[in-house]
Image: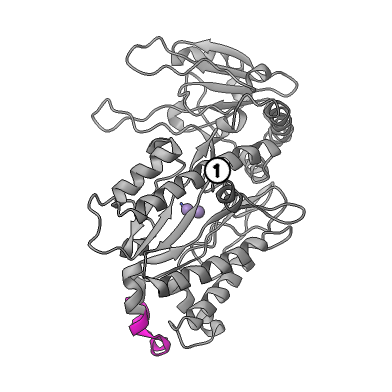
Amino acid sequence: MDITHPDLHPLYADHLATLKSRTDTALARAGRDHLVLAAGTPRYEFLDDKPYPFAVNPWFKHWVPVTKAPGSWLVYTPGQKPKLVYLQPHDYWHVVPEAPAGYWVEHFDIAIIREAADAVQHLPKDPARSAIIGEDIAKVGPFAPDNPKALLDHLHWHRTYKTPYELAMMRVASKIGARAHRAAEAAFRGGASEFGIQMAYLDAARQTENELPYSNIVALNEHGAVLHYTDFNHAPPAHFHSFLIDAGASFHGYASDITRTHAAAGADEFAALIDAVDDAQLGFCAMVKKGQSYPDLHVHAHHVLANILREHGFIRMSAESAVESGVSSTFFPHGLGHGIGLQVHDVAGFQESERGGTIPKPPGHPYLRLTRKLEPGMVTTIEPGIYFIDMLLAELRKKPVAKDVNWDKVDAFRKYGGIRIEDDVVCTNGEPENLTREAFAAAV
Ligand code: GLY
Ligand code: MN
Ligand code: MN
């Protein structure tokens, strides 16, 4: 997307108006006069002058599409034009952040500073009346982040409802991811190693690893059974059976989170299982509707996946008893998904209301990350999977229900690792918008 596209101006103006109005209420709740957001401060490796990759405070990039401005600050006082205090050091050792430009700058008073400590002169006169949001390390002078809970509860809650501007950013992040997924699949079909596939992905995304919203999972064969497999073997395997890739992209601070699983040529039984999970996944995506309880959807997914396990000959028990006895969790041991936006695992997945509180996870589902009801504007991932994980299968084998498992079939599938299909889906007032499927359709 061309960021100077005129349509972004009104979208961004509306987005900013929404943030201001949310912040007005949040400041009133916390009894403060100013919102002060720290972009953040680089951290260094122990005994070294080498910084870790910089990750901007997500609240900062909620206001401005700027992700590479350590030492900068943003101030909002109700009724006043927001102020960006922008650190552009005089420095010939490092890249100096570019001068602010684009559709958003006209909405800010901008003060350029050359030293991090100079930010204090441009921040509110009374730090005690400020809600200062950031990590401790971002402290400058008397401005130590204090992250008031009442303010953050309100802002976290509302951040789950994306503005049209945010959805536009997420559509682009999805398109970049879909384009790169196509390149990764082609590399797999061409016999590349995990490392080679990763290089093909980064090249097509035109993003470095540090710019991606999370570390890519590029897993050939049994590596797909390691849920967060982040090694990259440099040598191709002797035999190709399967390929699971969980990889996203970023755009103006917003994330996409996409997983696809591919069968190698000739792995027909595994391909049929992928098709079954894909069909099931589309069914779950269609249920991303106003008022849908996400934990109910997660438990529904367990039943559908258990049925697939039965139909494909892995288990002999009914779907109901597979879910009740925990057998479905051996094969599907993670949550159905999570909110996504400025962070790949977005905030407030368990929050009860804008005043805070926690909605507990259903018993027996410790890894679910979203317990809220879906409402228009929320974006969630839908990422069911079926895996053949040695550790979990060994535990299952010791239980009485093991007699209703077809171990020969299970053992024959270990070499494939597992299947996950993951899309990012917007809940609307009507039919859901599947950002990922639409991006793949456009990337043909
Ligand atoms: N890529 C991380 C996740 O799917 O949650
Ligand atoms: Mn995910
Ligand atoms: Mn993922």
Expressed as whole percent of the image width and height from the top left, the position of residue 298 reads 58, 66
Q: Count the marks: how many?
A: 1
Instruction: Name which residue lies at 52% across and 71% down.
Output: 276
Q: Which quarter of the picture shows residue 133? A: top right
Residue 48 falls left or right of residue 75: left
In this view of the protein, which residue sits in the foreground, 186 or 17?
186
Instruction: Name which residue lies at 55% across and 45% down.
Output: 174
- Label 1, secondary structure: give it: helix
Mark 1 Cα shell of 10 Å, populated few (<14), some (14-19), many (≥20): many
Instruction: Name which residue lies at 68% across and 19% down.
Output: 107
Q: Which residue matches tag 1?
A: 175
Expressed as whole percent of the image width and height from the top left, the position of residue 67 reads 50, 29
The residues colored magenta run 394-409
- Regarding residue 326, the answer to whether it shows in the image is no
Q: Main secondary structure of the magenta part?
A: helix
Label 1 is placed on what type of residue?
Lys
Query: Where is 400 relative to 266, above or below?
Result: below
Q: Which quarter of the picture shows residue 60? A: top right
Query: Where is 335 relative to 185, above or below?
Result: below
Query: Where is 295 relative to 26, above or below?
Result: below
In this view of the protein, which residue sits in the foreground, 270 or 373?
270
Question: Mark 1 vs ligand 3: CB under 8 Å?
Answer: no
User: How are the colours assigned in the image?
Assistant: one colour
Q: Looking at the figure, which quarter contains the N terminus?
A: top right
Residue 287 falls left or right of residue 116: right
- Tell whether position 402 is magenta: yes
- Tell whether position 72 is magenta: no
Expressed as whole percent of the image width and height from the top left, the position of residue 90 reads 40, 9
- Regarding residue 8, the answer to whether it shows in the image is yes
Residue 283 falls left or right of residue 314: right
Expressed as whole percent of the image width and height from the top left, the position of residue 281 reads 57, 65
